[in-house]
Amino acid sequence: MQARVKWIENVSFLAQSETGHAVLMDGAPAAGGQNLGPRPMEMVLMGTGGCTAFDVVAILKKGRADIVDCEVRLDAERAETDPKVFTRIHMHFIVTGRQLKQEQVKRAIDLSAEKYCSASIMLGQAGVAITHDFEIREA
C-alpha cells in the first residue's frame, strides 16, 4: 500500500491514496491552518472507525443478518504532552436492521476488534485503551 502527502501551503496538505482518492488535511487556525479539512489525527480516528465499521457490516452480511445501517461514534482522548498520541478510544456502534440478535452484533464487533480491524488492533498494540459498546435499532 502506498500513499502520497503533498504540502500545499501553511499547514495544509493533500493526501492521495494509490487508488487515486484524495483528501485535504489542514491544521487548526491556532497552528496557522485555515480549517479547510480534517486534522491528521482526526484522519487516524476516522480511518479506525471506517475500518471497524467495514468489518462489522461485512461479518453481519456474511451471517445473513438483515442489516440496513451501521454507524460508529468514536470518542478519543489524547496525551496532554508531545507526542500527543491517543490514550483511549471508545467506539459506540449503532446497528440498524430487521430482527438483529444481540449475540450476532456483539460477535461481529468482537471479531472486528480481536481479529480483523487492522487499524484498531495496531492502535491497541501501541497501548491505546480501546473499548466498545453497541445498540441495536429496528428498521
Image: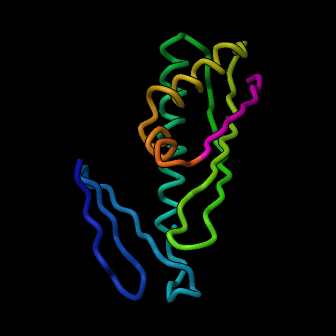
Residue at position x 51%, y 67% from top? 38
User: Quick check: 95 above or below 64?
Assistant: below
Answer with left or right where residue 78 lies relative to residue 9. right
Residue at position x 37%, y 75% from top? 13
Answer with left or right where residue 66 lies relative to residue 135. left
Judged by its main secondary structure, the magenta piece is strand
Q: Does the magenta stretch include residue 98?
A: no
What colouring style does the render use? rainbow
Q: Residue 129, position in %: x, y?
A: 61, 45
Q: Residue 49, position in %: x, y?
A: 54, 44
Q: Is residue 133 magenta?
A: yes
User: Quick check: 56 above or below 34?
Assistant: above
User: Quick check: 8 above or below 83?
Assistant: below
Answer with left or right where residue 44 lies relative to residue 75. left
Residue 100 vs residue 118, the one in the foreground: 118
Number of numbered labels in the structure image: 0
**What stretch of residues is rendered in magenta?**
129-139
Residue at position x 34%, y 61% from top? 22
User: Quick check: 118 above or below 48?
Assistant: above
Q: Residue 48, position in %: x, y?
A: 50, 46
Q: Residue 42, position in %: x, y?
A: 53, 61
